[in-house]
Image (cartoon, rainbow, N blue to C red):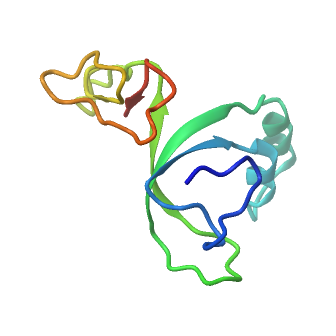
Amino acid sequence: MLLRAGERSPCLPFPYPQRFVVACLDPVGMVEDLEDADTQALQEARCITPKRYIFYLSMPLDLPGPDSQWCRYSAYPVAPALRAIDRELGITPDMVMPIAPNNRYAKGRQPLRAEPTFPFDNCFFW
């Protein structure tokens, strides 16, 4: 089921699990919510230009009720590029899973398929 931006789920007061979502993070709002938010942190947050990010929401980590304000998810970032090398953690650029129709760097694995077809041909799960 696809929902338009700002449209609520007819059955759930939070997004359906096992869906791709676009999130725009609010740096100022996130800093304001901190108990010890200081002036410098707020000034720096105001300098950040918010961007949109694609995530895959796997499963809810909470069992929210109809009046719940939050529902945490196990979320996986989706990126149009390979991961950066992190020798300390043993991460190499090819430690990604392509999302079909992308099939680069699959190393013999089948790319993950979305239904409906994922609209970008260059994305990976990190």
**Could you tell me which residue is drawn at 46 percent across and 32 percent down?**
118
**Where, quadrant-wise, is the N terminus in this rendering?**
bottom right
| Left/right of residue 55 with respect to residue 123 in the rendered view | right
Q: Residue furthest top?
A: 104
**Could you tell me which residue is drawn at 30 percent across and 36 percent down?**
112
Instruction: Name the residue nearer the viewer: 125 or 7.
Output: 7
Instruction: Name the residue nearer the viewer: 75 or 10.
Output: 10
**Where, quadrant-wise, is the C terminus in this rendering?**
top left
Residue 57 in the image, given as x and y percentages of width and height? 48, 53
Residue 19 in the image, given as x and y percentages of width and height? 49, 50
Vertically, is 13 above or below 125?
Answer: below
Instruction: Name the residue nearer the viewer: 89 or 50.
Output: 50
**Could you tell me which residue is drawn at 53 percent across and 61 percent down?**
16
| Left/right of residue 120 with respect to residue 108 in the rendered view | right
| Left/right of residue 111 with respect to residue 107 in the rendered view | right
Instruction: Name the residue nearer the viewer: 9 or 90.
Output: 9
Vertically, is 107 above or below 33?
Answer: above
